Image (spheres, helix red, strand yellow):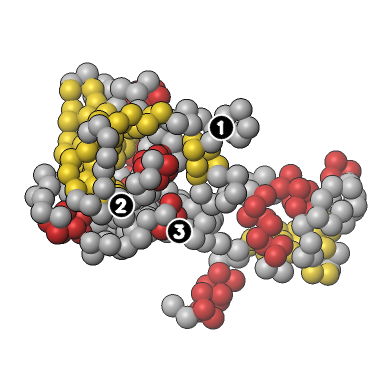
Amino acid sequence: MLADEGDELAAAAAELRQLEIGAAQHGARLDRALAELVPEFSRSYLQQLLAQGLVQRNGQPALKAAARVQAGDRVLVELRPTQQSQAFKPQALPLDVVYEDAHLLVIHKPAGMVVHPAPGNWSGTLLNGLLARDPKAFEVPRAGIVHRLDKDTSGLLVVARERSTMDALVRMIAARSVRREYQAIAHQRWTGPALRRIDAPIGRDPRNRLRMAVVDLSVHAGKPARTDVRWLGGDDAFCWVECSLHTGRTHQIRVHMASIGHPLVADALYGGTPALGLQRQALHAWRLAFAHPVTGQAMEFVAPVPQDMRQALQRLGYNPP
């Protein structure tokens, strides 16, 4: 679709809303006043409309969200669909469902698929695919997604199909009764014991807000994090490991492995570089095990290492499961 065509479609779908600033909003920022007068839309969405010149105040374009309003001001808002406002819409996407019952799904996510809509990825996500696959997904927060994998991490996720199952799975993950194991390929030769426990808190990197980091909780905000790492093989330049999560912090394995001098292959954010034919971080969620939250039955699922990581390990002389 051409950009002009997209603009025409958005304009055709727009709603013009006429508003009057009341005494309760007098002196408030324009964006805050709009959020009170149009409560069905988020403040960030209304700020986007302001930036796009789609709001008029007393007949003049209003571009500054911080402008102060006065009682009696007349405001005209052109409510156009944005990428963000369209995020929670169904999209027919190929999903690799490895298990399904009335209560939950287990899905094998490929590398490159985003799990949940976010800036830069408002469509084509696992959530969009779940909404298209199952109308019940609309009845569950976040379409039943209870844990996530990074965009370039492949592997297994469990998704709830009803609210009670979702609440139970969230409790199980918090109680560390959901077993999650990953295969990873990292830089540098492995030294020391074959089994290593990394118990180091993780928070936002104070030097780069786009990254996470191991932090000192007496100085920086963060949360406890634990990963058990088992050496499986390697050579003088790389190591193949299995990582077991005991907590679920953002980028946990990537951060913990980098913190001990073994950044994941091709993980540019944490010091890795492309190698062994890999262009995405060498991380795969290969085993998922838990007791079914409704029946209590022991459940275990295994997703074989994907082709790109398999070929990388074969270059090191290994045949992964």
Asked if the residue at tag 3 contacts the one at tag 1, i.e. Cβ–Cβ closer than 8 Å, the answer is: no
Q: Residue at x 67, y 49 (%)?
A: 43
Q: Which of 300/18 is in front? A: 300
Badge 2 local density, few (<14 within 10 Å), some, or many (20+)? Answer: many
Which residue is under mark 3?
121
Q: Going by the image, does 309 lie left or right of 281?
A: left
Q: Secondary structure at mark 2?
A: strand
In the image, is residue 109 above or below residue 299?
Answer: below
Q: Which of 293/111 is in front? A: 111
1 or 2: tag closer to the N-terminus: 2
**Is residue 88 at all visible to an observer of this figure?**
yes
Q: Secondary structure at mark 1?
A: loop
Residue 2: percent from the left, percent from the top? 47, 80
Nearer the observer: mark 1 or 3; the answer is: 1
**Is residue 108 at all visible to an observer of this figure?**
no
Residue 11: percent from the left, percent from the top? 59, 71
Which residue is under mark 2?
187
1 or 3: tag closer to the N-terminus: 3
Q: Secondary structure at mark 3?
A: loop
Look at the image and tell me in which quarter the C terminus lies. top left
Asked if the residue at tag 2 contacts the one at tag 1, i.e. Cβ–Cβ closer than 8 Å, the answer is: no
Q: Residue at x 84, y 68 (%)?
A: 59
Residue 216's disc is 1
Tell me the quarter of the picture where residue 254 sits: top left
Asked if the residue at tag 3 contacts the one at tag 2, i.e. Cβ–Cβ closer than 8 Å, the answer is: no
Q: Residue at x 85, y 41 (%)?
A: 24
CA gap, disc 1 and disc 2: 25 Å
